Image: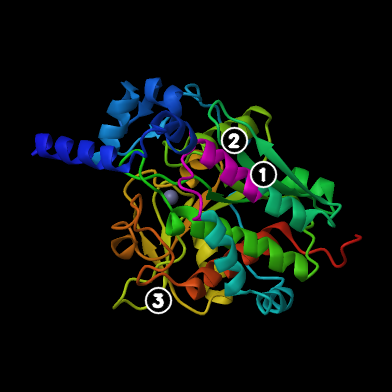
Amino acid sequence: MRVLWCVWICAALVAALPFPDTLDFLQQHAWGIDGVRHESILQLPHTALHVSAFSKWWMHMWGVRYMDITYTPESVCGPHASSVFPAQMHHQSELMAAFLQLCAKQLRKHLEKLTSFYTRHYRSASGKASALWISKVLEEMLAPIPYASVRTFDHPWLQPSILVHFQGTNASLTETRGVTLLGAHIDSANMLPFLRAPGADDDGSGTVTLLETIRVLLAAQWRPESDVEFHFYAAEEGGLLGSQAVAQSYARRHVLVRAMLQQDMTAYVAPGTSEHIGLVEDYVSAPLTNYLEQLAKVYLTIPAVRTQAGYAASDHASWNKTGYPSAFAIESAFASVNLGRAHTTKDIYSAPGFSFAHMLQFARLAAAFAAELGGWARSPDQ
Ligand SMILES: [Zn+2]
């Protein structure tokens, strides 16, 4: 059976390569030669393994779940944050007004561009170009906002992570309660190397959800009281590489983090199921997940359902590992997630069940998370 697989994969690869520019193609759209030669350290539940790039890919193909700790072999923990979250909501009128500005067309416009890159693989030139495009969109959006900044967080591979910082009005409040973080991953991957990886749902959806969240919050004149950041992580598909590097850098600088929310896959409503969102219960903070459930009850128009991933499924796990409170919201209970199309050429926004309206629910959740935990200062000048 495995021999048949190899024959099929080799045939697919040869068919996919545009001779005679094969090497140039690989450098632009695939791992690059460095990536093929690269060795990794993979953290499995009970052991760590040193493996070649081929073995890593092979393990991924066969569904082995790991965190790649090659660049963060010695993990440190950040300062301890409170696990008590507000009992009440304070910004319903501001948020409900902001939600009126949410626009599915904006989501679609950004997702069309994001999925037009051949791949967003973190070791590819097109993966880097896609990150720089996201950075440019953010810079243009935030240019008029003096209390917001965008920076690239460089890694030892081509694609950077992009970090957006909103400075709160009350620095001492940030010092005591910490910074509020929201994340999505910007890279994509095809299970078969060198093939196209549109990654519309995984995690183009989470990425454009955050872009739209920022847009509507700013349109509603939001400025937080304590600092809030939006993170666009590189290399999640490589084993949570980008988020581990960022989380470790925060821990080593003793940055206090109040809470982190990851949104990875926000678009799919499986045909025949009733629309809901999934709140993942493993590799997360239980008190923060309880709080997220309260936010969903107040701010969403669809129910939230508890679910289990069974592994460190996305970048929230990097923050959880570093001792910071993190939570993970996904498009549905895990049994109905779009995993059949993820990591294939079929992860496109015209797929059946792909819903921009569903993504807007996640923009509501993200905006509520940012404003209720970071606060909403009365005027932008405060
Ligand atoms: Zn993902």
Q: Earlier in the sequence, mark 1 or mark 2?
A: 1
Label 3 close to label 2 by CB (< 8 Å): no
Residue 11 in view, yes or no: yes
Which residue lies under the disc numbered 3?
Answer: 275
Indicate the amino acid at tag 3.
Glu
Of the 4 image quadrants, the one containing the C terminus is: bottom right
In the image, 345 versus 157, the foreground residue is 345
Viewer-side residue, 360 vs 352: 352
Q: Residue at x 35, y 53 (%)?
A: 345
What is the span of residues highlighted in magenta in the rendered image? 115-134
- Helix, strand or loop at label 2? It is helix
Q: Decide: few, some or many residues near mark 2? Use Cα within 10 Å; few <14, some 14-19, many ≥20.
A: many
- Identify the residue position indicated by label 2 in the image: 246
Q: Secondary structure at mark 1?
A: strand
Please report contact status of discs 1 and 3: CB closer than 8 Å, yes or no: no
Q: Which residue is mark 1?
A: 163
Marks 1/2: CA distance?
Answer: 9 Å
